[in-house]
Amino acid sequence: MGRLEGKVTVITGAASGIARAAAGAFVQEGALVGLLDRNADGLDAVAAELGERTFPLPTDVTDEASVAAAFDQVRQAYGRLDCLYTCAAVQLIGEDAPVHELDTEVWDRTYAVNSRGVFLCCKYGARLMIDAGNGGSIINAGSPTGLTMSGAGWHAYSSSKASVMGLTRVMAADLAQYGIRCNSIVPGSITTPLTKALHDDPVQRPKLEAAHPIGRLGLPEDLTGIAVFLASDESKFATGSLFFVDGGISVR
């Protein structure tokens, strides 16, 4: 029996990157996985690859009605939610900037997905967990850029991720009474479609690699183990924590 056998889960941003890798790992451990993303074609491709234990939920995380409808689908189909893992994010490389140079529209686009989107998914995910009465686990993807000098120059992205990690901790305090655990995974620089432009830059890539004491950039698969742990009952005494899986970048 898998470590997540029969658990109903929702993963946001599931059409690619960290979330797609997590979806595969959750399925391997026996979970039922709701794949949530605005890229409907991408979701269909992931669902076709991972099989019948997945169900696509095409959703715009910035739109409250869209998010509410997605979680209502989960409610109608399963009546409960055991784990929510929010990974959907944007990083507007080339547009993000220090605060005195930052276009307000870039700030708004970043916060719409990275902060508002996480809030909306946690709002409706937590409601479903509370109504079901079985507790659950909420995992939010953070970033060391919200805590360290690694976020210098990207003030919209870095501060949006700081808001996510702050939300995670206050949710942990208030939702514990319902048996809901809330934690954040804090990855280093992971090679995904989100970071492709940065990682392909021949000037920036060596600097990024050198910033990680472990000596390389991360892969989505580097984060699946901690995600499965936090989704499983093995982490039943863990809440309000930031779990760093960052190749050591945060110790610089």
Image: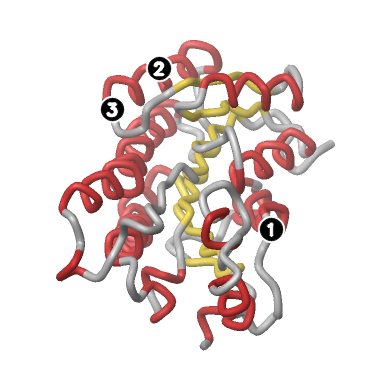
Quadrant housing residue 16:
top right
Residue 63 numbered tag: 3
Q: Is residue 101 above or below residue 172?
A: below
Amino acid carrying mark 3 in the image: Asp
At label 3, counting other C-alpha atoms closer than 10 Å, the crowd grade (few under 14, some 14-19, many 20 or more) is: some
The residue at the point 51 percent across, 64 percent down is 186
Tell which of 3 and 219 is nearer to you: 219
Give the SS element for disc 1.
Answer: loop
Q: Are marks 3 and 2 in contact (CB under 8 Å)?
A: no
User: For this view, does 237 lie left or right of residue 122?
Assistant: right
Name the residue that disc number 1 marks: 219
Question: Is residue 173 visible in this depiction of the protein?
Answer: no
Instruction: Give the residue number, with chain letter if any, for mark 2.
Output: 72
Q: Please tell me which of labels 2 and 1 falls first in the chain.
A: 2
x and y percentages locating residue 68 in the rendered image:
33, 22
Crowd band around label 2 with a 10 angstrom C-alpha radius: few (<14), some (14–19), many (20+): some
Report which quarter residue 169 is drawn in.
Answer: bottom left
At 18% from the left and 55% from the top, the residue drawn is 103
Q: Quadrant of residue 131?
A: top left
Circle 3: element type: loop
Q: Disc 2 or disc 1, which is closer to the eye?
A: 1
- Residue toward you, 77 or 60: 60
Q: Please name which of the two marks, 3 or 1, marks the residue nearer to the observer.
A: 1
Q: CA distance from mark 3 to mark 1?
A: 30 Å
209 versus 126 height, above or below: below
Q: For the residue marked with disc 2, what is the amino acid? A: Asp
Could you tell me residue 43's position as x and y percent? 59, 24
Image location (x, y in percent) of residue 99: 19, 68
**Residue 48 visible to the viewer:** yes
